[in-house]
Every structure is written in C-alpha cells, then in structure tokens.
Image (cartoon, coloured by chain):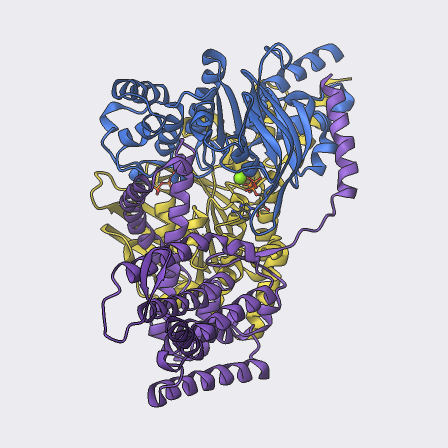
Amino acid sequence: MMAAQIAENTHQWRYRLDTSLRVSQRMRRTLLGTVPVHSPLYKLHPLTRFVTLLFLGVLPMFIDWPEINIMILVAIFIYLSWSRVDLSGLKIYLPLTITVAIFMFAISIGFPGYKPDYVGFPFMGLQLFFQPLFFTLASYWRLIAMLFGTIQYFSTNRERDTLVAIRTLHVPFVISYFFSLSLRAAGMFMEDMRIIREAERARGLDETALTLADRAKLYAMYLIPLFTLAIRRTDEITNALVARGYTLSGKLENGNQRSDYILSKYPFRLLDRALILGMLCTFVLVVILRVGFGYWSMDTDPLRIYLLAMLLGGGQ
Amino acid sequence: MTRSMKNANECLIEVSKLQYQYPDGTHALRDINLKIFENQFIALIGQNGSGKTTLAKSLNGLLKPSSGYVKIDGLDTRVKGTTKKIVTKVGYVFQNPDHQLFSNTIEKEIAYGPKNIGLGHDEVNQRVQDAAQVCGVERGLFQDHPFFLTKGLRQRVAIASILAMRPKTIIVDEPTTGQDLRQSLEVMNFLRDLWLHKGHTIIIITHDMNIVADYAQRCVVLTKGELVMDGATREIFSQPDILAKAYVKPPQITRLAQDVLEYNFPKDVLSVEEMIQAFKKIARKEH
Amino acid sequence: MKAISCQELSWKYSGRKRFAVENVNLDIEENTFVSIVGPNEHGKTTLVSCIKGLIPANYHGIWYGKVEIFGEDNRNITGQKMASEVGYVFADPESQFTSMTVEEELVFGLENIGLPFQVVHDRLEWVSEITLIKELWDKSPYEISGGQKQRVAIASVLAMKPRIMILDEPTSMLDPIGKDSIFDIMTNVKNETKMTIIVVEHNIEQIAPLSDQILLMYEGQIAKMAPPEEFFNNSDFLVDHGILPPQATAFVDRLKQDGFYDGVLPVDYEGGVKATRQVLQRHTA
Ligand SMILES: Nc1ncnc2c1ncn2[C@@H]1O[C@H](COP(=O)(O)OP(=O)(O)OP(=O)(O)O)[C@@H](O)[C@H]1O
Ligand SMILES: Nc1ncnc2c1ncn2[C@@H]1O[C@H](COP(=O)(O)OP(=O)(O)OP(=O)(O)O)[C@@H](O)[C@H]1O
Ligand SMILES: [Mg+2]
Ligand SMILES: [Mg+2]
C-alpha cells in the first residue's frame, strides 16, 4: 500500500515537473506595497523618484484650487498605474480618506463661524454657508493630494532606493550614515513587529476579532518586547558592523572614500536630469507665483467664482 | 512498525490542492495533497527552500492558502474567526525560538496562549504548571527573561508555550538545530513521549537524517514546493535514487549498508546497532 | 607561518561566576582547516569571538592572556584591517544582517574595505554563483528560508576573501547536500587562496574528513586536539564529552572492538565503505 503510494506520488511528480513551468509575476516588496520587478518605473533613477516625493507631496500645499489638486491626484494615479502598481491595493486608504472627509466637513458645517459676507443656502433642512464649505473642500483635496503624493513614493520604493537617492546627493557621510542606520532601524523595527505579531497569531490572537480600543491596547503592549528586542538588536548590529569593517567616518584607513557599488549600479540618464530639472523648476515657479503674486489662491479660483455667482444669482 | 499507519486512526488535518504564493510572487507550495492522522510521528524533509516552513505555517492557519484548502478537524483555515479554535488543535513551534518568545517572564510567556483562548485564571495556572513540568522548565526560572536563557531552554520554553494550549498536533520546526547531542536527544525523546504516551501527533521538520531514522514513523518529502514522497520512513530511505532527486541523503549507516548490498545487507538499516546485528548474522552464516 | 596564536587566554563575562574560556593555549598554522566541536555552552563561540577580537572590544568582562593574528596582538589591529584579515560568520544569520536586500548585504563588506567597482562586481557574481543565491538578490534577507539566510550570511563574508575565516555553526540549517557543497567550497577556497579556516560545528560527520585538526572544547578548555584519524580513536572519551563519531566511523570502531578489524579508523564515508568491504571479504569466504 505504502509502496504503491510512493510510486504514484513519484509518477505525479515527474509529470508535474513538466507542466509546472507556469511563470508567476515577480514582485518587489516596497515599504508599503508590492510592485512588479519589471515595472517601467525602475528605469528612473532613485533620485528622480525621490524628487517626485517632494514634488507631488509638497506642491499641493501651494495650490488652493481644488480642481488643480484633483488633477494632481489623477496624475498620481496615472503615474502609479503606469508603474504597474496594483491600484486596488490602495483600497486600504479609502477608510482614511472617508474618515478625514467626514471629520472635516462635520466641523465646517457644525462650526462655520460667521462673517458678514458669508453666503448662506439651505440644504436638506440645514443652513449652510458657502465660503467655509468651499474652504473645507479645497483644504480636503489639498490634503488628499499631498497624502497620495507621499503614499505613491512609499509604495513604489524601498529603503535601498531612498539610500541611493540620498547618497547621490553627496551629502556628508555622517549624515547618510545616520540616515541609513535609522532607515535600517525602522526596517528592523517593522520586522520585529511582524515577528511578534506572527508569534501571537500562532497562539491564538485574532486581530480581525478585536475592537478598535483593544487593538490600540494591543499595539501599546508591543512596546515592551520591541524595546527589549531593540536593545539586543543594538548589540547584534554593533557586532555585525564591526565584523565587516564599517566605520563612522566612511573613510578607508588610507584616507580614501569607502566605495559605493550599489550606487554605481543605477545609471543616471539624461531623462532623469530632465525630469528632475523640470520638477524643480515647476516647483520653484509655482512657489514664486503663489507667494509673490497670489496665483492659485482661493479667491481667484474660477470654480469658486462660478459657484458663488450661481448661488448669488439663484438666491436673488 | 509498531503502530498502524493509517485507516484505524482519525484524520486530523486534510490538505487538498494547496498552493501558496508569497506577496512577492514566490510560488512556495504547488498542489500539495496530504492527510495527517491521529497519533503519528511525521518528519517533513526536503532541501532548503523547498517549502517545509511554509507548509507547516499553512497547517496551523498562520498562512492562508492561495488556492486549495487546509481543513483541521473539518475547520477550513480560511474562514475568519477560527484562529482561536485552530491553535487549540495544531501548534507550531517556530524554526528560530527567538521568533516565538516575546514576553518578559517565562511564566507570562507560557500563559499567553491559554489566556488568549479565554481560559479562567485557575485553569491558566494549572496549564502553565503542567506544560512547564512536562518540558522540564523549573519553577525557579518562572520569573526569568526568556531572551537570556540558553538555547536548549529557550527551545523548551517555546515548546511549553505551545503545549499549554494542549493541541493534538504539534509541529516543531528544526527542534535540534544548534543543539548538542545530549540536548538533541532530550528534546527528541520528549517529543517521542508526547507521541507514545500522550497520544499527540508530532510533526518535525529537520535536516538531520539520523534523527528522522531514529524517531519518525512516517516521512513526507518536499522538493521545490511539491510533495514528492510520502510513506513509512524505512521505505522512503530504501529508495536512494528517488531521494537523491529530492536532494535528500539517507543516514551514513543506511548508505553504507546499501553500498555493500552484494553481501545481503538489508536495504533499510537505520542505526549502527542494526548494522552490527546484520553484520554478525552475515559473518556467522558465511563462516 | 602561524596564523593564530592564543597564549594563556581566559575570558569571563561580567556577571558570570565561571570563566567561559580558561587558560587556552592554541597555535593554528596558516592554510589549515580546524574544526571546533563540543557541547552547548562550553565556550566555542567565546573562543572564536576572542580570536576575532569582538571580545573584549564589544563585551564586558575580564580578559587575561593574548591573541596574535599573524604575529600581531589582535587588540592593536584596526577595524578595517581586522575585517579584511579575519572574516566571521555568526551562528544566527539574522543577527549578522545589516541591509534590507540580499545584494546590499553581499557587497556591504566589500564596500567597507574600499574595493573598486569591477572587483566588487566580480566577487558578487562569483560568490552568488557558488553558493546558489543569485535569484535571491532582490529579496529582503528576512524573507527567505532559514537555510537561504545561512547561505547569504556565509557568502557575504566569503566574498571578502579574508585570510582567516571563522564560521560559527555555519550550516546548522542547511540540507545535507547543501552542507556538503558549502564545505566543498570552503576546502576549494582553502586550497586556492591559502585561507585558514575555523569551523564550529555540532554535526561532525561532514567536517571530519576535511579537517586538518579537530579541537574539542569542554568547560572552556581544550580537552583534545588532534588530526581526525587520531581524534576518533577513543570513542568512549568522546561520547562522555558529548560527541558522537560519524556513523561509518562508529561502525568500524565497533568491528575493531569485536576483533573483526585492526586497521586505521576511517574518518570519511568512503574510508568506512572500504574498511567494511575489507572486513567482509575476510570474514565471508
Ligand atoms: N516571507 C517570505 N517572503 C517571500 N518569500 C519567502 C518568504 N519566506 C520564504 N520564502 C521563499 O519561499 C520558499 C520556501 O521557503 P520555506 O521557508 O518554506 O523553505 P524551507 O523548506 O523551510 O527551507 P529551509 O530548510 O531552508 O528552512 C523559498 O524559496 C523562500 O525563499
Ligand atoms: N553575552 C554573554 N553574556 C554572558 N554570558 C555569556 C554570554 N555569551 C555566552 N555566555 C556564557 O559563556 C559560556 C560559554 O558560552 P558560548 O556561547 O561560548 O558556548 P558555545 O560552546 O558556543 O555554545 P553553543 O553550542 O550553545 O553555541 C556559557 O556559560 C554562556 O552562558
Ligand atoms: Mg524552514
Ligand atoms: Mg556558540
């Protein structure tokens, strides 16, 4: 009986070796998600990708017009889908965006404040005011655009990409040293967290069955073991760094610079130069126009002007 | 074989067409079909990266199948809200005990599981006592920090913390890695006791073929995420050709007997003692 | 030339009652393969940490005696020189990782000793090729199997081609064939580059035939040090000290005790087969 089973399994195995050449898509784990290894995104230099963080994450701060911020948001999604990031993975941020919306609009409707030029209108039995409402709308989209400008970076890049970006800028070694050490510490912290959670799940912890309060308590409880682990990790990493000759100065004993193989693996192309230059120029231009000349401020928003006119026209 | 391998006993875990893919696309398990029965001692072997740990974690619901299913006492691991029930049926001791210990005293460590499945104070205490005693963790150590124990003790605390939930099936991932002879024997004999006298099903993952030969009654061999052999240890080791394809090497003494087969040595010698017996028989007969 | 020389070496961790390593005198010639065996907690790791200089630099405790690396007191050797002279593979591969991808991990040491791009590139290719980890480059070293972690840890030190390489239980999680291949690699490197190799191991079967010397650590002291042919000739002593000889050796030893065999004890499998054949030929007509 047993022998027959072995024979059968072996037979199946031979058969399967021929048919199991199914190639599955290789993915690369990033800080917040996964991206196909062959994403066109990775043709761009890490520094270029890093600049998109500044560009997309900060630019909306200087723009009040919601229609432009929505366009930036659309651009972010196009960029992500061109990078072949699975957009459905972004679903997890939906609750956050909805919560923020409810919170902001509830405050603005409940506590609109009052100024003489406020234009009121009734809506489903409520007395609403246009100006504070539109202000909230604009702030909301600005915030969401900034949020996704940041999320896009962290869901397409790893610690390594950020390190390469920083080192490309030739900041002093001590700075990049501490930066990389803290990135590693963050990475290990997350790793330890994952380990502890898995250990707890192996002993019956069911996070999906917890209430929000319980979950908060749980996370607070992680701090103790994480702290102990961190102490041990510090010892370990000191040993590990020393054992392979890492020094704070970044200099060799003969005075030369430590070599940087990983960095030189990333080609810095003309396209990267052009993109970075383009993004920086646009950024500077927007800041100058906004701060110096009041472009894209709330009062000048065509959408706002149009709606206000409608409201005033319709009201009279 | 001292015990019946199949049929007579109840099926505890049923795995059907199990596939598992990690988020980065690594296809770690391909189409695994497997049944684990009551009161068996099973060794899960195979080369590095063949998917043993992945399979073990799937057997207690830590990893959910990408397709196919794992049923524990009829309970599908993919169904939400079954975690607490599953851990009282199948326990998994991690490959690295450091990945399992997180409390700041040994007592809390062992008590975590029983508390978590909602047992009362007295029952929890009782189980901590029992598990600690069975695993040879002395009371005097209860307030020590698990991180700063010796390797052997850490391993035992890890097993105790799983045992405290009294699962029928216990999976231990590489129980003897880094342990010396005495401690390896200790932990293996302890696992054998659980199997022989307490009715547990034990699944070990190991690269030490001598241990497989000495302890396991049934052997499951994985290669590149596929289950290629499943059967009685003796039968598995008597097929070196197929084993070689799975990058598994039987114990030295088994190979030695197989290399001098022309003298009528049995193909399935599992220990030096058996080899000596066989030799004496042959030498006497031929004289 | 002497690669390593320990003189009256003792070390006690602070807070411990006993010395973890006590009065060790040890000379290791260049280009030899030394295996260190012994039960848990008997000072194997402590001894090799003293040689590498991690003790006393990164630990608290009491130190007596002296360790010399190629004739130079190891406490006077600077960090980078030490890194390129003495490679050290930790027992727990995870405690050795400093990077978040395997590729970075492999080049980390090479970058630190300032090797030029092409050399780093060639070493990276070479080491990944022989240790079979090329397809793991892009993964996180925490998200691979136990044995793969161990391969990465070994490869990242081997890539530096140090003059002395210390490996603390480097293959505890490798499959039997993987163990063989790692030790084959080590032997080849030893022969090609005059490397001196020290391996701490519990599993003696694979390393015995490769070793020039086997050293038994017991209660912080060297209980026995001999070439493998001599090392196993008193199996009761070994078993008392927690060491089990390889099965083939043990079998032939039993034949010897029962008067069937009177030759030299084999230390490797092939030798075991040969001796067994001899005995069988003689005792079957
Ligand atoms: N967290 C993870 N993310 C992605 N891939 C993983 C992860 N863990 C393991 N793998 C991959 O899945 C495959 C199977 O790994 P697994 O840990 O199950 O192997 P194993 O049989 O336990 O090997 P070992 O004997 O070395 O412990 C390997 O190729 C490994 O690289
Ligand atoms: N960091 C430390 N602090 C205090 N004591 C330690 C430390 N590391 C080891 N010891 C103690 O020193 C002694 C020797 O330990 P060591 O780790 O050298 O043993 P080993 O032979 O390598 O054992 P194993 O086979 O378990 O790795 C033990 O008694 C141990 O408890
Ligand atoms: Mg494993
Ligand atoms: Mg040790």
Instruction: Look at the image and tell me in which quarter the C terminus of chain A lies.
Output: bottom left
Q: Taking the image as drawn, is residue B242 in sight?
A: yes
For the point 55% across and 60% down, the residue is C194
Q: Residue furthest front?
A: A316
Question: Residue B73, located in which quarter of the rendered image?
Answer: top right
Q: Taking the image as drawn, is residue C38 in sight?
A: no
Chain painted yellow: C
Give the image location of residue C6, x and y in percent: 35, 52
Up-down: is C74 above or below C169?
A: below
Query: Ligand 2 is found in which quarter of the picture?
Result: top left
User: Is residue B67 toward the left or the right of residue A214 in the image?
Assistant: right
Give the image location of residue C179, x and y in percent: 58, 43
Foreground residue among C64 and B254: B254
User: Is residue B208 toward the left or the right of residue B255 in the image?
Assistant: left
Give the image location of residue A261, x and y in percent: 52, 71
Colour representing chain A: purple
Colour representing chain B: blue
Give the image location of residue B236, x and y in percent: 68, 25
